[in-house]
Image: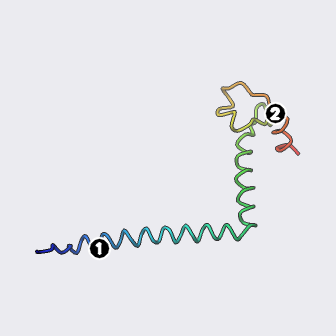
């Protein structure tokens, strides 16, 4: 009954993979906890992302700005402008 011993390469590979996966889970837990307990930062990131999405819908034609819902306009120059819903315009134009 001879048992084959693992090679040095397989031992190193398994340990590197184990600690890499462990480090990923620890980093995920740290990031999640940081955002969970820091509500101010999470709110700022949310507002920043929404602002970027809304800014993508602003187009300028003939030196006049226009608002196009970013989800409805992929290419504002070639598409027909959609009708802006009443719920969308007040959020963009104060």
Q: Is residue 28 above or below residue 63?
A: below
Q: Secondary structure at mark 1?
A: helix
Q: Please state the horizontal and vertical placement of residue 59, each as a whole percent of the image.
A: 74, 37
In this figure, which residue is indicated by the disc labeled 2?
85
Q: Please state the horizontal and vertical placement of residue 9, each as a whole percent of the image.
A: 24, 71
Q: Quadrant of residue 1?
A: bottom left
Report crowding for label 1: few under 14, some 14 to 19, many 20 or more residues within 10 A (C-alpha): few
State the residue in front, 17 or 1: 1
Rendered residue at 69%/33% (across/down): 72
Rendered residue at 48%/67% (across/down): 24
In this figure, which residue is indicated by the disc labeled 1?
12
Residue lying at the far left in this picture: please name it. 1
* Alpha-carbon span between mark 2 and mark 1: 60 Å
Q: Is residue 76 above or below residue 6?
A: above
Q: Please state the horizontal and vertical placement of residue 85, each as a whole percent of the image.
A: 81, 33
Instruction: Choose the circle earlier in sequence order: 2 or 1.
Output: 1
Q: Quadrant of residue 16?
A: bottom left
């Amino acid at each position: 009954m001879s048992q084959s011993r693992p090679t040095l390469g397989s031992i190193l590979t398994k340990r590197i993979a184990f600690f890499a996966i462990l480090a990923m889970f620890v980093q995920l837990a740290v990031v999640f906890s940081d955002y969970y307990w820091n509500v101010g930062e999470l709110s700022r990131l949310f507002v920043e992302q929404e602002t970027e999405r809304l800014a993508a819908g602003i187009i300028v034609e003939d030196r006049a700005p226009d608002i196009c819902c970013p989800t409805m306009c992929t290419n504002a120059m070639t598409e027909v402008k959609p009708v802006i819903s009443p719920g969308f315009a007040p959020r963009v134009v104060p």
